[in-house]
Image: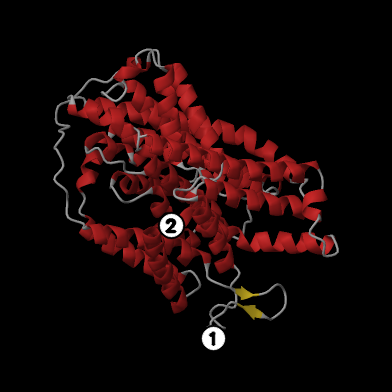
Amino acid sequence: MILGLLSPTAIILCLIGVIIGIIFGAIPGMTATMAVAVFLPVTYAYPLTESLALLLGLYVGGISGGLVPATLINIPGTPSSICTTLDAYPMAKNGEPEKALKIGVVSSFFGGIFSLLILYYFAPALASMAIKFSSVEKFLIILLALTVIASLSKGSLLVGIFSGFLGVFISLIGQFGDNNRLRLVPPGLEDELIYGFTLLPVLIGLFAISQILKEAEEGMKRQDFQNISLDKKEKFSLSVFKGQIVNLFRSAAIGTFVGILPGIGGSAASILSYSQAKNFSKEPEKLGTGVPEGIIASEASNNGLTGGALVPLLSLGIPGDSTTAVLVGAFLLQGIQVGPLFIGNNPDLWKLMIYALLLANIIMFIIMYFSIRTIAKLIYAPKQILYPIIIVMCVIGAYSINNGIMFDVWTLMLFGLLGYVFDKIGIQTPPFLVGFILGGQLEKYFMDSIKGSGGSLTIFFTKGPIAWILWILIIVSIGFYIYQNSKQMMCACEE
């Protein structure tokens, strides 16, 4: 299986994935999550080796592509590129756009490789510990994931928690346990919803259709950007990284660590690493004026997120961010369950993922470093042409996933509208999605725990030290958010 990754088909698919990911990342409004969601149905036609090469290529390329609009038009292509705009755009306006882009590309490559090494050494150790968990600990881990994601999502804590448990509620639609009793199923849809909503149309609807609806509302006409020309050839030397090695390692480490924490996201990693670069800088006043230091901090951290976010997914079965949550769908399509047993039961597949990530990062670096002038033109791609094509791909993918069931297309549209409405009323999509994915397991482990204790809820509090630690982490995550929220409110009142 490992040698299969090196097959021409796998390499070509990884190459295609990186290119398409870069395109999605480079066009404002299109993200890595959207890229993976749109192309997820395609993987159903390929063996797991080729599927992973394609999806991981999309993942790495999508995160990296956000550098382009952040540098040239001051618009983050992805949320993780927010802080890239602070120095890359001023550098581009100062007549060095190619230098800014190449600093970002090199930093992104370093961050990706650093996080890959952390994934390789850290995930197996965490998984081996998690294998010892009983149904009680597994239930509390899922509860912790929902709580952490809710507490770190935008908006109020209650809305975040509500979003996660709304996803759990929707996941419970369908047949209850092993009997034939249906629950939460509207009359007339018993046959269609006997197994609940299909995951893939839900994913594509939430992250592709809803985004297109938002873009349509705002208008797809090309904005009048300040033209930054790349016609003038610039000499680039790695000497710009002289004195920035500590910054490079620190930022990659911060991005990887933030990726390991479920639900925080790339924007938080970018902001945190940028602020630390400013704190440790000898000339902090220069950050934000177009210096390499700021670009390195942001780009090394957001690509460090790629490997870090896979750590909780592959070792605990908990998605690290919205993109890895979508990757769960790819594994389910291939009949593979991620979690504590994944690495031990699938050693070849585990090594395959490491090689696929390595290959994707190398391809990303080569393409973006040597073709940056061509890639820069993507920011002006007409969305009124791209988005109809994407909608058609989404519909075809949803329809074909279960061999031609029209209800999956209606599911796609329904959750696309829900994602659009969620954004309007403040419900957070990432907690909702994670709740939807983990809802079935949450119920299973809860019921198994209750059966094992003879119907007593005290089992969740008396199981042992691991359960107590998990309860402490749940309380700390909620307490931390309450503290941060109250601190922000006090600052607002003082102003």
Left or right: where does residue 264 sit relative to residue 313? left
Query: In which quadrant of the rendered view does residue 190 lie?
Result: bottom right
Quadrant housing the C terminus: top left
Say which element carries label 1. Answer: loop
**Residue type, mark 1 in image:** Pro
The image shows residue 458 at horizontal and vertical percentages of: 81, 56
Mark 2 sits on what residue? 37
Checking the image for residue 361, the label placed there is none
**Of the pair 71 and 4, the residue shown nearer to us:** 71
Residue 365 in sight from this viewpoint: yes
**Residue type, mark 2 in image:** Ala
Question: Which of the two discs, 2 and 1, labels the residue nearer the N terminus?
Answer: 2
Q: CA distance from mark 2 to mark 1?
A: 30 Å
Q: Is residue 452 above or below residue 282?
A: below
Q: Residue furthest right?
A: 454
Residue 354 in sight from this viewpoint: no
Badge 2: residue crowd in 10 Å (few <14, some 14–19, many ≥20): many
Residue located at (20% from left, 23% from top): 234
The image shows residue 134 at horizontal and vertical percentages of: 78, 51
Total labels drawn:
2
The image shows residue 268 at horizontal and vertical percentages of: 45, 38
Mark 1 sits on what residue? 187
Residue located at (17% from left, 25% from top): 95
The image shows residue 242 at horizontal and vertical percentages of: 38, 13
